Image (cartoon, rainbow, N blue to C red):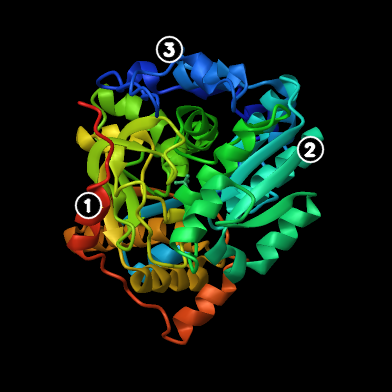
Amino acid sequence: MSETKIILSEHEIPKHWYNILPDMPTPPAPPLHPGTGKPIGPDDLKAIFPMALIEQEMSPQREIPIPDEVREIYALWRPSPLFRAKRLERVLKTPARIYYKYEGNSPAGSHKPNTAVPQAYYNKAAGIRRIATETGAGQWGSAMSLACQMFGLECTVYMVKVSYEQKPYRRSMMATWGAEIIASPSNRTNAGRAILAAHPDSTGSLGAAISEAVEDAATRQDTNYALGSVLNHVLLHQTVIGLETKAQLAKIGEKADVLVACVGGGSNFGGFAFPFVRDKAHGDKVRLVAVEPKACPTLTRGKFAYDFGDTAQLTPMMLMYTLGHDFMPASIHAGGLRYHGDSPLVSQLVHEGVVEAVAYHQNPVFEAAVTFARSEGIIPAPESAHAIKGAIDEAIRAREAQDARVIVFNLSGHGHFDMAAYDNYFAKRLEDFELPQGDIDDALKNLPRTGA
Ligand SMILES: Cc1ncc(COP(=O)(O)O)c(C=O)c1O
C-alpha cells in the first residue's frame, strides 16, 4: 500500500530559504517612493522594517540561511506533512494522484507563522520593542501575535472590521498570545479617521488596515511594521513549504504535473510554487495554478500596473496586478483573499505566462471544501478551499482525459474558526458576488501616474 502521509524528520527542515529573484525570467521592476515616484532604496524602508529584512527584500543571493533560533521554533510544527488524498481520489473517480501539503498544523492554524517567526526574530535582534500589523481573516494577526510572544515583543493588530465581527475567537486567540486587537478602520490613526469620515459604516479592507498599521509604526521609534504577504521577504520565508514538498515528492519518486494554491497577497502560493519555477525554467513542464475569488479577481481581471499597497497611499508603489488601492471588496467569507493587489513577483510570473490564474465563486468553493472534509477529514479554511476547488477541477479534467497526472495543492490552513461561514453555506445564505466591470473601471481610475 502506498503511504498516506509523507513525513520528513526534523533535521530535514530546510536550512536555507529559496530566493527566486536571481531566477526571475526578467528582472522585477523597482518599487517606487510614494512621494517622489523614484525607485526606493534601503533607507526609505528603515522607518518601519529592520535592515535584515530590507536586505532580504532586495537580495540577489539564491539561498538565504535560516537562523538556528528560527529553525528551532519551526520544529514545533515543521516539517509539515504531505498527504496523498486517496479517499478524495476515490470519491472523484479520477486516475490522477492528488497530494496536499498541510500547513494547518502550525499553532496559529495556517502557513502564516513561517514568516511571522523570522520577522519577529529580526525585529527583536534590531532592538525593536513593539510590532504593529494588520489582519484580514485573523490568520496573520494570530501568527504575528504568536511570534511576538515567543520573542518578547508587544503586538498591536489592526483587524479588518468585518472579520473582527465575524470571528470573535480569532480575537481571543490573539489575546491569549498577548496581543492588542483593534477593529479597522479605527479612530487610532489619521488613515482610519479619514476612512470613517468618508464611510462611517465601512466594514474595512486589508488596504485600509495596512495604512493604519504602517502609520502606527512610522510614528513611533520603538515600533516596526510587519506584513503577512505581498513583499519579497515574506514569500522568501514561505519557501520552506515548497522546498519540503519537493523533498517529500522526491522521497516517494513522484513528480508534480500541476501545483495549485490560493492567492490573497501571494505568500502561500509563492512559498509553495517558487522552488518549482526554477525547474520550469530548465524545461520541466509543471503547471502552476493560482486560485482567487471572483469577488476579488485581482489576477484574472485586475490591471498590471504600478499601485500603492494600501488605501492611504503610504506604502511604496509596486508593479503588480491591482484592482485599485481604494477598491472595497464584498464581504465574502475568504477574508484573507480580499486584497486589491498581489505580490509583484507572483504578478509578474502571471503576466509572463509562467503562472496560470483562475477565479471561483464562493458557493462552489464551499462545495469543494465539504467534499474534501467528508473524504479527507480536515475542515479547510475558506481561503485554502479555493485551492481544493482548483485541484478538484484538475482531477475531473484528468478523469475526462483518462490521464493519471500528479496534482499537488497547498492546504494553507484549517477552518476551525470559520464554522459560521460553513453554517451560512449550509443554510444557503452565501451570495456569489460577480464584480461589475464598472466597479473595477472606477477603482482603476485612481491608479497613480508614474510614467511606467
Ligand atoms: C488560510 C489562508 N490561506 C491563504 C491566505 C492568503 O494569503 P496569502 O496569499 O498571503 O497566502 C490567507 C490569508 O489570510 C489564509 O488565512
Q: Which numbered disc, 2 or 1, marks the residue that appears first in the sequence?
A: 2
Coordinates of residue 240 in the picture (x, y in percent): 54, 33
Question: Whole-Å distance between the Cαs marked 3 and 2?
Answer: 30 Å
User: CB of mark 1 within 8 Å of CB of mark 3?
Assistant: no
Q: Which numbered disc, 3 or 2, marks the residue that appears first in the sequence?
A: 3
Which of these two is toward me, 292 or 161?
161
Q: Amino acid at mark 2?
A: Met
Q: Which numbered disc, 1 or 3, marks the residue that appears first in the sequence?
A: 3
Q: Residue at x 73, y 29 (%)?
A: 222
Coordinates of residue 64 in the picture (x, y in percent): 54, 17
Residue under pointer 3: 60
Which of these two is toward me, 221 or 94?
221
**Other residues around mark 2 within 10 Å, as few (<14) / some (14–19) / many (≥20):** some
Residue under pointer 2: 150
Residue projecting furthest to the top: 61
Question: Whole-Å distance between the Cαs marked 1 and 3?
Answer: 31 Å
Tell me which corner region of the image, top left, top right, bottom left or bottom right, holds residue 352. top left
Residue projecting furthest to the front: 197
Coordinates of residue 326 in the picture (x, y in percent): 36, 51
- Quarter of the image for the C terminus: give it: top left
Q: Amino acid at mark 3?
A: Pro
Q: Count the numbered circles shown.
A: 3
Residue under pointer 1: 301
Q: Nearer the viewer, mark 2 or mark 1?
A: 1
Kindly state the secondary structure of the residue where label 1 is placed: helix
Coordinates of residue 24 in the picture (x, y in percent): 31, 22
Residue 105 in view in this figure:
no
